């Protein structure tokens, strides 16, 4: 995991503080570094393609592990510890899911946004960042 530094570290501390103010009940902390999430993304994509509900649960568990517990998601061996993830998911995910993941990445980059989360409506409307629930509801109703 690469250590945060400079402007990126300051921006991350600010973003985490904003999330804390918007959702005080949400446990979140500044992670100790930036993991290489390639294996985690590919594994999640493979599980999502096999079982969407289980895949969504895995994605949530990965977020909690990183943003609350500070787990280094760079370690592929660690991914097998998550519920519903098989050794095959971790080992074969890169080859099987590379095209899907690359397509998702391309689509995300084409939005011109770097905020997460990013919701995109059917006509390309965007809601960027962690916003209050009424804004999410309004966005969904309008799109």
Image (cartoon, rainbow, N blue to C red):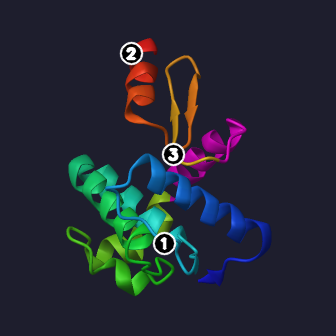
Q: Residues within 10 Å of mark 1 (few under 14, many from 20)?
A: many
Find out whether residue 108 is within the magenta segment.
yes
Could you tell me which residue is drawn at 55 percent across and 81 percent down?
32
x, y (%) of residue 33?
59, 79
Q: Residues within 10 Å of mark 2 (few under 14, many from 20)?
A: few
x, y (%) of residue 76?
43, 81
Q: Residues within 10 Å of mark 3 (few under 14, many from 20)?
A: few
Q: Which residue is mark 2?
A: 141
Could you tell me which residue is drawn at 32 percent across and 58 percent down?
60
Q: Earlier in the sequence, mark 3 or mark 1?
A: 1
Q: Are marks 3 and 1 in contact (CB under 8 Å)?
A: no
How far apart are labels 2 and 1 at the CA level?
35 Å
Q: Earlier in the sequence, mark 3 or mark 2?
A: 3
How far apart are labels 3 and 2 at the CA level?
18 Å
Q: Nearer the viewer, residue 60 or 41?
A: 60
Q: Is residue 143 above or below residue 72?
A: above
Give the residues drawn in magenta, as a range. Answer: 98-114
Q: Which residue is mark 1?
A: 39
Q: Which residue is mark 3?
A: 117
The quadrant of the rendering that contains the N terminus is: bottom right
Q: Nearer the viewer, residue 120 or 131?
A: 131
């Amino acid at each position: 995991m690469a250590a945060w530094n400079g402007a990126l570290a300051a921006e991350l501390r600010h973003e985490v503080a904003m999330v804390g103010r918007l959702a005080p009940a949400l446990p979140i902390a500044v992670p100790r570094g930036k993991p290489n999430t390639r294996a985690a993304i590919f594994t999640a994509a493979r599980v999502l393609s096999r079982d969407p509900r289980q895949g969504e649960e895995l994605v949530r568990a990965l977020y909690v592990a990183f943003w609350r517990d500070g787990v280094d998601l760079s370690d592929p061996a660690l991914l097998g510890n998550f519920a519903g993830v098989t050794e095959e998911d971790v080992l074969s995910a890169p080859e099987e899911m590379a095209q899907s993941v690359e397509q998702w990445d391309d689509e995300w980059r084409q939005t011109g946004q770097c905020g997460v989360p990013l919701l995109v409506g059917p006509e390309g409307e965007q809601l960027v960042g962690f916003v209050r629930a009424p804004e999410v509801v309004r966005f969904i109703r309008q799109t």
